[in-house]
Amino acid sequence: MTALVDRDVLFPAEPAMRGLARALYGAVAHMPIVSPHGHTDPRWYALNEPFPDPAQLLIVPDHYIFRMLFSQGVPLEALGVPRRDGAPVETDGRAIWRLFARHYRLFRGTPTRLWMDYVLGTLFGVAAPLSPETADAAYDTVAERLAEPEFRPRALFERFNIEVIATTEGALDDLRWHRMIRESGWTGRVVTAYRPDAVVDPDFEGFAGNLDRLGELTGCDTGLWQGYLDAHRARRAFFRSFGATSSDHGHPTAATENLAGDEAAALFDRVRTGRADAGERARFRAQMLTEMAKMSLDDGLVLQIHPGSWRNHSPAMLARFGRDKGFDIPTRTDYVAALKPLLDAVGLEPTLGVILFTLDESSYARELAPLAGVYPALKLGPAWWFHDSAEGMRRFREMTTETAGFYNTVGFNDDTRAFPSIPARHDIARRVDCAFLARLVAEHRLREDEAHELAHELAYTLAKEAYRL
């Protein structure tokens, strides 16, 4: 690494433990990356075109970056974030980069700072810390690298030693880019994941039209409950034909239901015709989580539940810029009562894979670890989103290991849209896990040979097994 990232970053300060963490990390640092859940754009791998300018690649699409800057008074327009009404925004990449560099101090101590320093130093060879004085030189260095064939998406995929990466597409996506990747003959393994939020959430924009489109794509009558379920089965099979091994569900809560057939059909009819109230719409979302779990028993897709985010908290920002613009806020989330209908139905099935995530860290030790520590169908996803940080990863291990152990967790996934940051994120996770294992060895709670075995499993094996890759 360059001077931007110290070789012992995130390792313990105590010398003996640091040495052990360094040894554990050295054995896994260069292992292949398994990226089983994320949001990179499959068209990058399909077209294999040069990435745009440094700002368009590293700043404009990254909500971790622009939410922090906006909190300090920087307008999103000045960062090049497109407006829904087509009003002008900054398009000069160098101007955006200079603005970012002028405010880079705001990220001190944050995971964004670690990721960005890693990307600039390790990937692009920028040696000087980013500042207003070094902004232009850094921009020029990154821009020069991006023009080279070695920095095109497929070359970076291979350079990053990615064994497999999963993108995430909506249920109505035609998967054209995945088809193009397959037909290109390139050997990089890029699979999709089934994200049906737009056709299971009655509050999703354009829901009724989305159901019509679902019916058109599948030839199923999505005006009827059974036809609607059959349409999901057809789309899941289509996604599986392009390598999908998982589905992904971003619900406001973890609530589930397990209604009888007639009751579920009546609820669907109210939702489909726009007559459902807020409680009924929430109940329908809950029912669909259980329906997706039942379908997973049939087709083998791993079900990921990502609950607990109040999406688009600011209606003004949603109206101006659209979804996913940094205004998603964590909420308190119940799992024990919420998941009981699903678990009563299928939770004891050892062949089912349900991966739980949370934005509510208070649930780790109280709810999530005890649930995953007994139900065969459940596994815990890694520290997620706002907690995808060194501190968040440490807290996750400290609060879940005592009850769920390591083997009811699924390793690490980067869950990112920022392709260049993938190696940084996996490196941080590997360092944090090795530091945690070193502490257990130092406290005589784990043998050193067991720590080495676990380091390998946490970095690689558990993700492959949990996601059936």
Image: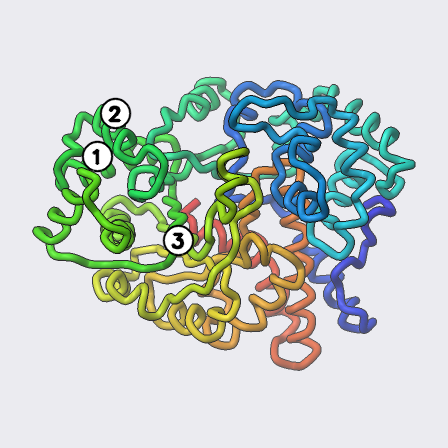
Q: Is residue 461 left or right of residue 434?
A: left
Instruction: Choose between 402 and 449: the one closer to the eye.
Output: 402
**How far, Cα to Cα, is label 3 from label 2?**
27 Å
- Assign a secondary structure to mark 2: helix
Left or right of 460, for residue 113: right
Percent across and percent down for residue 363 are 47, 69
The answer to which of marks 2 and 1 sits earlier in the sequence is 2
Q: Do the CB atoms of the residues marked 2 and 1 lie less than 8 Å apart?
A: yes
Query: For mark 1, what is the residue?
Result: 231
Which residue carries the number 3 mark? 252
The quarter of the rendered structure image containing the C terminus is top left
Task: Identify the amino acid type marked 2.
Answer: Leu
Q: Quadrant of residue 458?
A: bottom right
Q: Is residue 287 above or below residue 151?
A: below
The amino acid at mark 3 is Pro
Callout 2 crowding tier (Cα within 10 Å): few <14, some 14–19, many ≥20: some
| Closer to the eye: label 1 or 3 | 3
Give the numbered dot on residue 217.
Answer: 2
Q: Residue at x 42, y 49 (%)?
A: 467
Badge 3 marks a residue whose secondary structure is loop
Residue at point 61%, 32% (across, down): 157
- Packing grade of label 1 (10 A; few <14, some 14-19, many >=20) is many
Separation of marks 1 and 3 at Cα, in angstroms? 23 Å
